[in-house]
Image (cartoon, rainbow, N blue to C red):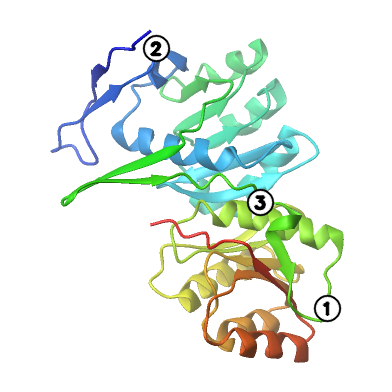
Amino acid sequence: MKIKNTKIKLRYGENPNQKAFLISNSKKSIFDFQIQGKQISYNNLIDLDSGFQCMAEFTEPTSIIIKHTNPCGVASGKNILDAFIKSYDSDPKSAFGGIIFLNRKLNYELAKKISKNFFEIVVAPNFDKKALKALEEKKKLILIKIPNIKQNVIERKSIIFGDLYQTKDLIKINRKFLKLVTQHKASLKLINDLIFSLKVAKHLKSNAIVLSKNKQTVGLGHGQTNRVDALTTAIKNRNKYFKGKVFVCASDGFFPFTDSVNLLKKNGCSIVAQPSGSINDKKIISFSNKNGISLYFIKNRLFKH
């Protein structure tokens, strides 16, 4: 059966002076899954798209907080409450006004935690009755109950030259995605942290750096015009909230020079994942071997523009 496109008018676009609408080409639009709160906006829709795409990488209990299309705190935990607390603690300042994505039912205890702070939207596959009761006082808070969203195989972007199309990057990031290129092998626990970091890096605007520990982001750098600044931003956050913790680093692109790897070494990081492709790959490997760094090359580059 052919589904008719539905045009849905929005309050406004990115800014109040811009008009906007959504054309939905499915039986149900995102608005059909809203169970509480104010009208979903243009910017909300873009952030929701980013959050759903990132959450598709994770199967264990995971919480993602999205701010301006980028994850600002991501964590996996033993349960969804643990995951949320870790994701919020990753960067409490940036989490203010963000969108929470959960891949498990939202329970009463977690709802009480969420209600203590300001968020725009909470997305979960389900909400228990007591959780809904705890959140109903926050009348503007948007709640979206949606079990899963089917991933598109093709991505489209409209630019001034026309419409760009590409196949979606659906390759799974797992242990097979990593290749050890130095003498020093990381523990299985740290390799799992690297895999976690790469899943997040894939959904950050380039240049992207993810520092993590125990499947919790401890420093993120994204949208910078050079990789050193992205790394510096990530380390700054790590030193602010998690100073002293050993961490791993994932980069969406290669480090072109040893300066970035040296900066990581000085800040206590000895496990790094990056794609190959630089003319200085051998220098990076040599530097890592001399300084006891476990360096892994990844199967594919993870740019997001």
* Residue at horizontal 61 percent and vertical 22 percent from the top: 125
In the image, what residue occupies the spot 80% across and 62% down? 190
* Cα separation between marks 2 and 3: 31 Å
Q: Which mark is residue 184?
A: 1
Q: Is residue 98 visible?
A: no
Q: Amino acid at mark 3?
A: Ile
Mark 2 crowdedness (10 Å alpha carbons): few <14, some 14-19, many ≥20:
few
Query: Quarter-wise, where is residue 273 in the image?
Result: bottom right
CA–CA distance between discs 1 and 2?
A: 53 Å
Horizontal side of 164 relative to 203 (left or right) equals left
Residue 87 against residue 289 in the figure, above or below: above
Residue 264, compared with residue 247, is above or below; it is below
> Residue tagged by mark 2?
27
Residue 278, image x and y in percent? 52, 81
Quadrant of the frame with the C terminus: bottom left
Instruction: Tell me where residue 277 appears, x and y as whole percent.
Output: 54, 76
Element marked by disc 2: loop
Q: Earlier in the sequence, mark 1 or mark 3?
A: 3
Question: Going 65% across and 27% down the picture, which residue do you hit?
Answer: 112
Q: Amino acid at mark 1?
A: His
**Separation of disc 1 and disc 3 at Cα?**
21 Å
Q: Secondary structure at mark 3?
A: loop
Q: Position of residue 175 (x, y in %)?
A: 75, 56
Return the x and y of residue 264 as percentages of the image width and height: 65, 79
Q: Earlier in the sequence, mark 2 or mark 3?
A: 2
